[in-house]
Amino acid sequence: MSQDIFVVAEHLKGKLADVTFEMLGKGRELADARGGNLVAVLLGNGVKNLVTEMGIANRVISVEHASLENFNPETYSTALAEVIRAKSPAATLVANSSMGMDLAAALSIRAGLPLVAYAIDVKVEDGALVATSQLYGGKLNVESQFSAEGAVVSMLAGASSADKGRATGSPAVEDFAPPLSLASPKVRFKKMIEPEGGDVDITTKEVLVSVGRGIQSVDNIPQMQELADALGGALSCSRPIVDSKWLPKTRQVGKSGVKVKPKFYLALGISGAPEHIEGMKDAELIVAINSDPNAPIFDYAHYGIVGDLFDIVPLLTEKAKA
Ligand SMILES: Cc1cc2nc3c(=O)[nH]c(=O)nc-3n(C[C@H](O)[C@H](O)[C@H](O)COP(=O)(O)OP(=O)(O)OC[C@H]3O[C@@H](n4cnc5c(N)ncnc54)[C@H](O)[C@@H]3O)c2cc1C
């Protein structure tokens, strides 16, 4: 096993995801602590222009093939497993994103390496790599020490700073021959289904009143909308609200929704699962109302109210209208 730390670059439509820079920043720290190299692995087709954005890496391993043009867990995990077998990194960091969750699990099987999922941190302790994973919606943290063979680690977005990993430069590029099996994959990309447009763009709003399963019924949406209107903001939500079709997908904040950065984010009846936090943690001021004092959202809120939102929302609306 080498001392190198590999980071799998996640990109979509020609743009590197923020989480890639977060992992590069973390990877740099780990590679330096172990005296190894930070190596970015870039899979795709015609995406080498992204290399210069990963100047923090010592080297970029590039695998290019038509079947890697769009994300495909089969072709991506096959190609990556070959790279890992050939290079034996100490750890391979993959985003714990919608794509990365598919990829990391398949990669772990194909490369015959353990998978540490939902990681919020990785550090070097007495020479060994130790990852901290956040489980049960952030209620439990688990530490895992890697065995000597290395591991695949899927990192939650937002766990570390993306700015630490952003650096332009010209890292050396190593072209890695794509495995022959990529020519006839069983899984094929058909088309990208874009979310419908036409609704309010919550990414541009300065005030968001965000509702979660705690609002209990679609009948309570107008009451929450009234508060959003009184505050001059828009209504956003957690995923179960979209899954129940109480609000359109365009209003969903989080991993599989959108990232927002309003001046004021009011979370009503939202527990604070990592997938939701990922989308709103950068809001300037976060206030949460939740009846459960142990709800993880309170770890991220600047101010919290433990109580029944149906008691508090009318009072806030009245104040905001005054
Ligand atoms: C791949 C993947 C992607 C995902 N993407 C997203 C995403 O983009 N966005 C997202 O939000 N989630 C996403 N999720 C789902 C996420 O894991 C959580 O299930 C979800 O965020 C929980 O939503 P919630 O907080 O509204 O509901 P719950 O977790 O059920 O929380 C409801 C909260 O309301 C509180 N409550 C209940 N009644 C009241 C009351 N009267 N007054 C005050 N508080 C009350 C409860 O105490 C509880 O904390 C994703 C999951 C996966 C696996």
Image (cartoon, grey):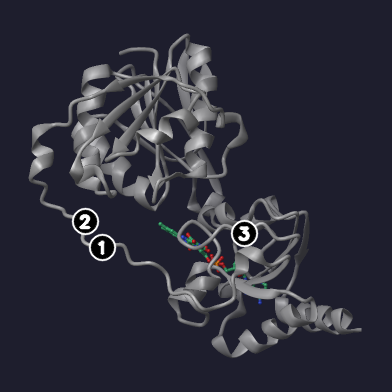
Percent of width and height locating residue 307 = 74, 71
Residue 166 can be seen, yes or no: yes
- Contact between marks 1 and 2 (CB within 8 A): the answer is yes
Q: Secondary structure at mark 1?
A: loop
Percent of width and height locating residue 173 = 35, 21
Residue 144 falls left or right of residue 113 = right
Q: Which residue is mark 1?
A: 191
Q: Which residue is mark 2?
A: 189
Kind of residue sitting beneath label 3:
Val
Kind of residue sitting beneath label 1:
Lys
Q: How far is mark 3 from mark 2, CA to CA?
A: 29 Å
Choose the circle earlier in sequence order: 3 or 2. Answer: 2
The dot on residue 260 is: 3
Q: Is residue 220 above or below residue 206?
A: below
x 45%, y 16%: residue: 128
- Contact between marks 3 and 2 (CB within 8 A): the answer is no
Q: How far is mark 3 from mark 1, CA to CA?
A: 26 Å
